[in-house]
Amino acid sequence: MVFTSKSVTRNQPVAALSDETEEAKGLPTSTSEELDQRGREGDESLEHITNRDQNSERYRERLEQEVLARTSELHKANADLAAANSEMEVFWRSIPSILVGLDARGHVTRWNPTAASVLGTDEVSPLGKHWADCGIQWRQPDMRAEVERWLSTDKPLHQYDNATFEKGNQVRVLGLGVRRMWFAQEGKCGFMITGADVTERRVLEDQLRQSHKLEAIGQLAAGIAHEINTPTQFVSDNTTFLKGSWEPIAALLTFCWNSIQPETKSHDTAQFVQRLHELWHKGDMDYLLAEIPKAIHQSLDGLQRIAKIVRAMKEFSHPGSDEKAPVDINRAIETTAAVTRNEWKYVADLVLQLDDTLPLVPCVQGEFNQAMLNLIVNAAQAITGTVVEGLGEKGKITITTRRHGVAAEISVRDTGVGVPEAIRTRIFEPFFTTKPVGKGTGQGLAQVHSTVVKRHKGQLWVESEPGHGATFFVRLPLAVPSDGTA
Ligand SMILES: Nc1ncnc2c1ncn2[C@@H]1O[C@H](COP(=O)(O)OP(=O)(O)O)[C@@H](O)[C@H]1O
Ligand SMILES: [Mg+2]
C-alpha cells in the first residue's frame, strides 16, 4: 500500500496564499490592526497545518512499518502453513495403513498410497466416487447397503474383521474401521476409513489355531489311548473266554446232535444220560450259562465305549466348517467331556446339567470344542491341587447350559483352588500361567477369550472364591451379528 501527502513549505509568506488583496477585489480595505490580526491568524493556521502534516507523516511511517511487520508475519505464517502442509502430506503418504476419507454422502475425498497399493487402484481415480464404486471387487454381499448403514446411524465406529475382496486371482482379507467424524467448520460429517490387509496374519492365525488343536489332541492322545485301552482289554478278555467256552459247548451240542441221527443214534438211554452228564460237568456248563451272557453284555458295553470315544474324537478333531454354523452345543459339550475323560476322572466327577430346550447356537464348532476342552482341563487341574488322586473325596466339575435372553450361557464350575483376586484380570492374557513348565502354556484361556469374545462377539468372565473353586461363564449370542463381522 502506498501513502501520499501534500507537503507545505513552512517559510512561505501568508499573503502568498492569495494573489489578490481585499482592496484589489474591491472589498473594503482593512485597518492595519485588522491586518496584524489576520497575519497572526495566518501564522497560527500555518503552524496548525504544518503540525497536522507532520503528524500525518509520522502516522504514515508508523502504518508503513506496521504493514511491513504484518506482511512479514503473514509470509512466515504462510511458510509455516506450507511446511505443515507438506509435512502432513509426507505423513499421509508414508502411513503404512489404508487411510481413506469419505464425505457425508460416502464419496471418496482422500485416498492414500497404501490404500491404492492394498486395494489395487491408483491414487486418483477413486476420488469423488462412492466407496462402493471405487473399483474394489468386494465379496461382501452389498457394500452400498453397508455405506447406507454408516450414513444413517450415529454409531461412531463400524468395525470389520473380515472384509474380503478379490485382487488379481486372490481373495484378500481386510481389517477395517470406519469412523464417523464431525467437521465443525463445514457443519457436516464425514468418515475416515482405516485398515490393513490381514490376509497373511489370518493364514498364520489359522495355522496357529490348527497347531493348538493338534497340540491339544496330542496332549489328549495318551488319555484317549488309555480310555480306549481299558474297554479293549476287557472285550479282548471276554472274547478269549468265549473262545475257550466254545469247545465244551460244541462237544455237548455235537453229542446231542449225533444222538438223534439214525446212523449214530444210541438206544441206550442210561448211557446217553451219563455221557451228557459227563460233558455237562466237564465243560462246567452251569458256570458258562451264567457267565457267557455277562461276557457278551460287557463286551458290547466295551465296544460301545470304544465307539463313543472314537466318534467323539472324530467329532472333536473334524468338527466341520471354519465358518459359523448352527451347533448343538449340548452335544459338543458331551463330546468334549468324553474325550477329556482321562483328564478329570481320577480327580473329579463331571456333572452335566444341559438345558435340552436350548436352540442351536451359531458358532465355529471346532473352536467352541477347543474352548470347552480348555475350561474342563483347567477345572480338572485346579481340582488336582486340592485332592490326592485316588484317596478321599473327589472334586466336582459341573457344566451347565441355559438360555439367557438372546444368548446361550455355559458355565463350568469346579471345586478346585479358585482364582486369586490378584491374577483375575491377567488369566486371559496369552502365555499367562501359574503352572510349572511343561504343565502350563498359558494359552488355554487366551484361546477361550479369542473364541468367545473376538470370534463370536460373546462374553466371558470368571467368578471365584479362592479356596472354594471357580466358575467360568461363557455367553454366546443366539443370532449372528448383522454388521458382517463374521
Ligand atoms: N478353573 C481354574 N481354577 C483356578 N485357576 C485357574 C482356572 N483356570 C485357569 N486358571 C488360572 O489361569 C491361568 C491361565 O490358564 P490357561 O490360559 O489355561 O493356561 P495354563 O492352564 O496353561 O496355565 C492358570 O495358570 C491358572 O492360574
Ligand atoms: Mg489351561
Image: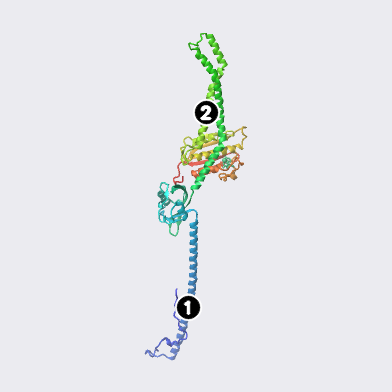
Residue nearest the viewer, comparing 89 with 27: 89
Q: Residue at x 45, y 89 (%)?
A: 36
Residue 230, x across and y down, in percent: 57, 29
Q: Which residue is mark 2?
A: 303
The amino acid beneath tag 2 is: Leu
Residue 463 at x, y = what percent?
56, 41
The outermost residue toward the left is 26
x 50%, y 67%: residue = 76
Q: Nearer the viewer, residue 366 or 264?
A: 264
Structural distance between the alpha carbons of marks 2 and 1? 116 Å
Residue furthest out toward the front: 263
Q: Nearer the viewer, residue 26 or 327?
A: 327
Image vertical order of residue 135 relative to residue 371, above or below: below
Viewer-side label of 2, 1: 2
Q: Which residue is mark 1?
A: 57
Crowd rating for badge 2 (residues with CA inside 10 Å; few <14, some 14–19, many 20+): some
Secondary-structure class at tag 2: helix
